[in-house]
Image (cartoon, rainbow, N blue to C red):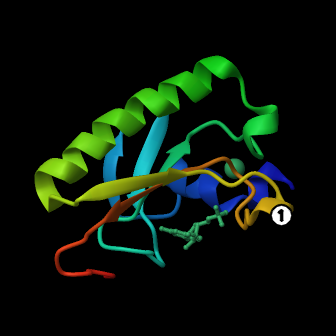
């Protein structure tokens, strides 16, 4: 894909507005437009990588470090009972946006909250 046409490049770099919950020089963390659950967040690196196959380990490590902070912030604000972290690579794996991103999906037992 041409990076100029990549929606997550535009979101990560602020060209397209998004519901941003965190931003630093490495990434932007946004709320998913079609959330699987309340608080569903996406960590999007500012640099374009199609998926994990083209990503360097240093950036991947930074993304996971940020994931630990986002997880704790979600816990503090939303008090979920659990959390799924998932990350799809390739069409065969369900990837639909071909700019690396990590999903953080809080899970709730008590009220069976789905939104
Ligand atoms: P994938 O299937 O590639 O792992 O996940 C892509 C995710 O990006 C989906 O959960 C989808 O709802 C989300 N998404 C796609 N386009 C946009 C957008 O323009 N804004 C936001 N906030 N999320 C998006
Ligand atoms: Zn991109």
- The C terminus lies in quadrant: bottom left
Left or right of residue 4: residue 30:
left
Q: Under tag 1, what secondary structure? A: helix
Tell me what residue is drawn at x 64 percent, y 36 percent. Answer: 47
Residue 25 shows in this picture: no
Q: Is residue 112 above or below residue 4?
A: below
Q: How crowded is the residue under tag 1: few (<14 C-alpha within 10 Å), some, or many (20+)? A: few
Q: In this view, does 32 lie above or below 55?
A: below
Q: Is residue 111 above or below residue 58?
A: below
Left or right of residue 112: residue 5:
right
Q: Residue furthest top?
A: 58
Q: In this view, does 44 lie above or below 30?
A: above
Measured from the top left, where is residue 74 in percent x and y? 23, 52
Residue 44 shows in this picture: yes
Left or right of residue 67: residue 8:
right
Query: Residue 5, located in which quarter of the rendered image?
Result: bottom right
Q: Nearer the viewer, residue 28 or 58?
A: 58
Measured from the top left, where is residue 75 in percent x and y? 19, 50
Find disc 1 in the rendering and name its residue: 91
């Amino acid at each position: 894909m041409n990076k100029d046409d990549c929606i997550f490049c535009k979101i990560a770099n602020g060209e397209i507005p998004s519901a941003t919950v965190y931003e630093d020089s490495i990434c932007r963390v946004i709320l998913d437009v079609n959330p699987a659950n309340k608080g569903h967040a996406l960590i999007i690196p500012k640099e374009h990588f199609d998926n994990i196959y083209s990503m360097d380990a240093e950036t991947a490590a930074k993304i996971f470090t940020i994931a630990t902070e986002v997880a704790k912030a979600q816990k503090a604000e939303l008090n979920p009972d659990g959390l799924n972290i998932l990350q799809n690579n390739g069409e065969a794996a369900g990837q639909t946006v071909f700019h690396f991103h990590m999903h953080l999906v809080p899970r709730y037992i008590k009220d069976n909250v789905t939104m």
